[in-house]
Image (spheres, rainbow, N blue to C red):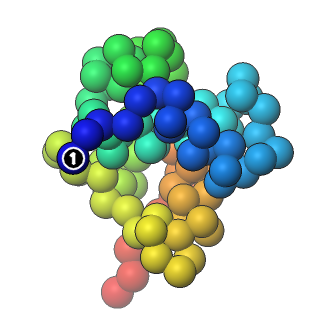
Amino acid sequence: MRKPSFSRIQMEVTQIDPDLEIDSNGFRTAVILLSALAVGPNIKKIAKFTGYTRKEIAERSKNLRKNKIWVGGKTNCDWFGEDGGIEFTCDSLVADGLMNRVEQK
């Protein structure tokens, strides 16, 4: 399977939420999340792929790893099911440090 291009990732984010401005924090967070699926949840690789700074990716990485969305070289997500849009939005909020994922018991 071919890795999607950066412009393709941006297009997908625009389709997910057409109201997001391309230079907004929310747009950049969504791009980082989808880019991790393409190149792995690796700060250096995502920075190279997106052109975003390592610092802004690292801030989100810390939250994603703390909440077990990024574990090792994998992204734990359920973004492609019936409620995928909601889950993607929630994981974006987690990445931005605005909420935490709670484990179900």
Tell me where residue 105 sits by quadrant.
bottom left
Q: Residue furthest bottom?
A: 105
Residue at left offset 67%, top offset 50%: 15
Task: Determine whether, in the image, residue 34 is placed left or right of residue 44.
Answer: right
* Percent coordinates x, y for residue 73 in the rendering: 18, 43
Please determine whether, in this image, residue 31 is positioned above or below residue 98.
above
What element does badge 1 sit on?
A: loop
Residues 38 and 66: in front is 38
Residue 54 occupies quadrant:
top left
Left or right position of 66 against 55? left
Does any portion of residue 59 appear in the rendered image? Answer: no
**Which residue is situated farthest in the front direction here?**
2
User: Residue 63: x percent and y percent?
Assistant: 44, 43
| Amino acid type, residue under disc 1 in the picture | Met
Residue drawn at the location 58% of the way across and 34% of the way down: 10
- Near-viewer residue (54 or 22): 22
The residue lying at 82 percent from left, 45 percent from top is 19
> What residue is at 60 percent from the left and 65 percent from the top?
85
Does residue 42 lie above or below 11 as drawn? above
Q: Residue 87, position in %: x, y?
A: 54, 66
Give the answer, above or below, for where 39 lies relative to 94: above
The residue at which mark 1 appears reads as 1
Q: How many marks?
A: 1
Pointer 1: residues within 10 angstroms few (<14), some, or many (20+)?
few
Residue 45 vs 31, above or below: the answer is above
Q: Quadrant of residue 88?
A: bottom right
